[in-house]
Structure formats: C-alpha cells, structure tokens
Amino acid sequence: MSDVVYKKLAAHLDDLPGGFPSTESGVELKILKKLFSPEEAALAVKLTLIPEEAYVIAHRAGENIDKVKEKLHEMSRKGLIYSI
C-alpha cells in the first residue's frame, strides 16, 4: 500500500494544535498504519476539530453517508475519534 494517504494524514495532524511532526525514520507513518486502515486515514483527513454530523463529513469527503457513518463508528470504536 502506498504511503501517500498516511503522509496526507500525518500532514493534516501536524497542522492541528498538538502537532504530529515527521521524523527521519518515518516511524510516524508506521504508527498511523497500525492505527488507521487506508480508508479510515483518507476519511480522517476530512475531519475538523469541530464536531460535525456525518452527512457534513460525507459531503466534504464525497462519499456515501452510510459508508461514512460506518467508518466513523469503527474509528470511534477503536478510539481514533470521539463520538458525541
């Protein structure tokens, strides 16, 4: 699997207040690969810090709302995001 989606996620996370700096070894990408499936990583790039309804995220991601709801539920179950 290409690292592109994980590099995008790492850059997205690094733009957040807590940051997610890159390393020479690339260990941050290995961590993201352990935590996120490629599909989850692609969706996570579309998330903001502001809680939003699934249909808003689905629209931004250009994906089917039911599939987005399923991915968000799984990401929440894994502790990757919080659901309110």
Image: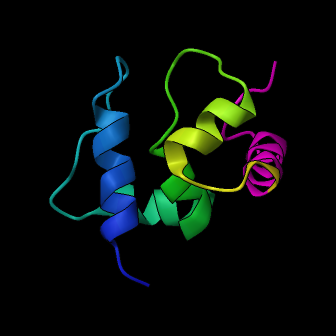
> Going 32% across and 54% down the picture, which residue do you hit?
8
Question: Relative to 6, is 35 on the left or the right?
Answer: right
How many numbered callouts? 0
Q: Check the image and report above or below for 83 versus 31.
A: above
Q: Percent from the top left, x then y, of residue 66?
A: 82, 52
**Residue 32: where, in percent of width, then height?**
48, 57
Q: Is residue 79 magenta?
A: yes
Residue 48: where, in percent of width, then height?
Answer: 49, 26
**Where is the C terminus found, in terms of image quarters?**
top right
Q: Residue furthest left?
A: 24
Seen in the picture, residue 83 relative to 17 is either above or below; the reply is below
Q: Which residues are magenta?
A: 67-84
Q: Quadrant of the N terminus?
A: bottom left
Is 52 one of the magenta-colored residues?
no
Residue at 20 percent across and 53 percent down: it is 23
Q: Nearest the camera: 80 or 63?
A: 63
